[in-house]
Amino acid sequence: MRTELVSPLLAMPLFWLCLCNELFVVSGLCHDDQRSLLLQLKNNLTYTFESSTKVKSWNPTNDCCGWIGVSCDKEGHVTSLDLSGELITGGFGNSSSLFSLQHLHKLNLAYNDFNSVIPSAFNRLENLTYLNLSCAGFRGQIPIEISQMTRLVTLDLSSFLMFYTSNELKLENPNLQKLVRNLTSIRQLYLDGVSISAAGHEWSSALMSLHDLQEVRMSWCNLSGPLDPSLGSLENLSVIVLDVNNLSSTVPETFAYLKFLTILSLSSCQLTGTFPQNIFKIVTLSIVDISLNSNLKGFFPDFPQGSLQTLRVSNTSFSGAFPNSIGNMKNLTELDFSCCLFSGALPNSLSNLTELSYLDLSYNNFTGRIPSFEMVNKLTYLRLSDNGLSGAVPSSSHFEGLNNLVTIDLGYNSISGSLPSSLFTLPQLQNIMLSHNQFGQLDKFTNVSSSKLKLLDLSSNNLSGSFPISIYQLSRLYVLILSSNKLNGTMNLDKLSELIKLDLSYNNLSVDVNVANADPSYFPTIYDLRLVSCNLKTFPAFLRNHSTISFLDLSDNHIQGIVPNWIWKLPNLENLNISHNLLTHLEGPFQNFSSKFLELDLHHNKLQGPIPFFPARGLYLDLSNNKFNSVIPRDIGNYLSSTIVFSLSNNTLSGTIPDSLCNSSNLQFLDLSNNNISGTIPWCLMKMSKTLELLNLRKNSLMGPVPDKFSAACALRTLNLRQNKLDGKIPKSVSDCTSLEVLDLGENKIMDVFPCLLRKISTLRVLVLRENNLHGHIGCPNTTATWRVLQIVDLAFNNFRGKLPETFFKGWEAMMSEENQDESKEKNIRHKIYQYGQLYYEDSVTVTMKGQQMDLVKILTIFTSIDFSSNHFEGQVPEQLFEFKALYALNLSNNAFSGKIPQSIRYMKDVESLDLSNNLLEGNIPTELATLSFLSVLDLSFNHLVGKIPTGTQLQSFPASSFQGNDGLYGPPLTEEQDGTEPGVLQEHQATVSTIDWNFISVEVGLIFGHGMIFGPLLFWKQWRIWYWKVINKILCWIFPQLYFEYATKRGQTYATLRWQH
């Protein structure tokens, strides 16, 4: 027993002695030459002492094998060197002592800033198996010497300089093929951000030579496609990351053969086709990211139980129902199906995903109720916005148990009922976004003093009653948005003064902003305040001395009188909207005017006098619909160097358009319409069309020709010069405006032919040439160009003549089809002002419909109209016109059209206004006309129509004046039967039987009778008189080409005057 006890006691010291000896041998003592080389490296490197955690600690008196970042072998040779994250900026080249450390196996220089090419001396490190130069600031061509490091197993050359093309790391000569041809031991190859610029077969072939390859990362490499199916034969591949390359390829089915695949990331690769379902069945997969491939289709299979942790298919064309089998993927932590085409109900199996922390299903077509997430208690981010979810939240405790939830977004659905109070008691919740739903009530909640809630957005719901006082308990709340609800009553802001953003707009609230003795401690950090339509009568005086306010919207209130001077001096105010009030003056002086204004909106007030100032940095300036009555300052353009939108419309400004406006190099929207501006249009303004998208000068007194100076790179989408005194011809260079959507030159004195120069502008939606001196035939021969989206055409009151060519209308597809009409009802022609955000400029146009002129403030893309009235068109009306199913208004009156009204008129199912009066149309009224159920205005008067007006239809609801002047037409609302008299008009004298013997009538009587046969109809028969004078006028115009017609409308009647062209 004694011997047995002694043996273990003797063994223990021996064990520790051996162990210490082993540790000593492994650590080794640093060789002097190794220490010397490292110290020489330290002295040559350029770095800051504060940013270094490794090199600065290298003490010459200590064993170098114990230095931070240094490891040695048993013999004391340095085998591993890690200098990552030292922010080294220089002192590293081919002569560096580092390349003399011949025993190095691992070298990590990642996350530095060498700002140089990769030294070619790396091939001297023959034993290196691991080389990491990622994000180290290297640039230029990767040297061929890297390919001579044949023992490399891991090579990481990833670069973060891919956004700076002048400093990017390149792999062009040598290319990828030459770089890896000798690196046969490579298992991990990381080249993210290196510019490779190779086609699919080239880089795929290079990778195929690496038989042991396990991981490849080549995102942002300028790679081209297609993805080569042969990559599926690299059976050891476990990681494939090729994000942000223009592969333009399908995903090969062979990828499903990679049985060790753990990560597949092909985000933003322009992928096409259908994603292979079998890839989802690879049991080793942990991450799949195929997001941001909008043309990639796909459907989910029945998921087996697997190791998948992250699944991202956002911004693709994946569709179908949400797979119920998703509940089998119990390791999922992130699921992103946003911006796809999924539909149907959300499965209850989502509650099986107990490891899920991130769920985004927004922007799909999911319907039904919100499923339970009771078991998903690790969820931190839940977004189901922009779907079709409906119904009430099942109970007030529906979200209980989600104790890790930080953000919930259910906005833009149709969820109704009460807002569950359990949401407000979740301990980690910081952001609640439930806007644009149908919630009608906010349940009262208590015991939320420890709530971490920072953002609450309940805008655009049906919340009613007084302001919910429970919100006052949310002590950490910073952002509160309750706009567009039905809240009512009077409230003050005292208990909300800790907010940084507050929006109570568009309710029935009356907000009291009169705070006595307010100082900066009241709303001390407010930067965004929106009180639109809150029945304000004064400016919030508590803002007078605030330094944080940046966005202030007090529009659509009852504030009247003077805009106080202090508002211009708020130091950080960038966005101010006080439009739609009763303001009359701007208080000066303006010497200390804030230079930070970006958006200033004063439109729809009663501001008068001269225009006082222009913010130097203003992007959006709207002073329209006021009473400013000065001239436009001559140097105005010198203050608008940053301005994108500038509107002075609907004032009483006079003078001329200053040339300095052309100095506004960033101007995209210029609106000076509805003023008293005179003079000519500056030619340089047309030169600005390279940046201008909208130019509106309508309803002024501008004269002279339109300058023919449009830029060859013209970006105009709207050109509106209506109701001026412009003359000359339509400028030829306008044909360079290939994005033009609205062209309105109506009510001027332009003398030209039909502008066939516009025929190649396929984007044209509105063409108005009304009331000019245009002449000749319309139509553009020898062209196949079409106006596919043309919806409004107005050529009325010109001197166009001849027949309407049938081919002219064949390309007007917007008027032909009823498809997508419902989708278009809420769409209108508008221009997005900023690339980001929701600010738009909406086009307007004046049209004549139902006998009256109407200003369409918003031009709905569904509205269509054709007005060819008061010209000299003749011949039959092309049947193509009567087949426009989507046409709302057609006016062909006051021409010389002949022939019958075709039966194809039945196709005009949407027409509301039809005017064919004062033509030479003949035959019966087709019964098909009576089937047009939306028709509310009809005028067929003064033609040669005959027969009975179709009865038993809505045609009898139109007045008799709609049919008068047609000799043979009868029936309600005219006379009941045909009696040989003029329909609807009682004859004053009945015909008598003549008993005169013609043998005794003198020559004088015969002469009188002859004259009566000619001139009688002219005096008593209106239709004959109209026809006679049209013939005479045509003869005169043929003899004298200088003659032209000018039309005018007075008291509902149209008159033609023959004038001599000077």
Image: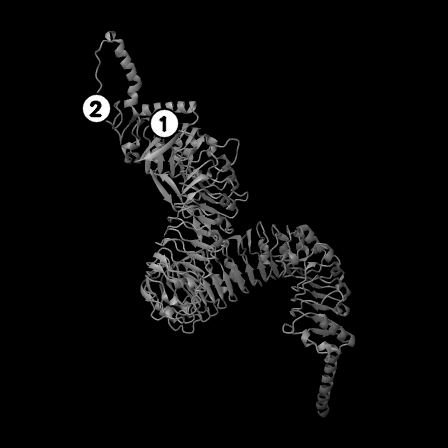
Residue 384 higher or lower than 84, as above or below: above
Judge the density around disc 2: few (<14), some (14-19), many (≥20) Cα neighbours within 10 Å: few
User: Where residue 170 appears, x then y in whole percent?
Assistant: 68, 57
Per the rendering, the mark at residue 988 is 2
| Residue of label 1 | 921
Q: Is residue 516 left or right of residue 823?
A: left
Q: Secondary structure at mark 2?
A: loop
Residue 719 higher or lower than 353, as above or below: above
Q: Secondary structure at mark 1?
A: strand
The answer for how far apart the CA atoms under marks 1 and 2 are is: 28 Å
Q: Which image quarter: residue 587? A: bottom left
In the depicted view, which residue is nearer to us: 882 or 444? Answer: 882
Q: Residue at x 68, y 50 (%)?
A: 201
Quadrant occupied by the N terminus: bottom right
Q: Earlier in the sequence, mark 1 or mark 2?
A: 1
Q: Give the tally of numbered discs.
A: 2
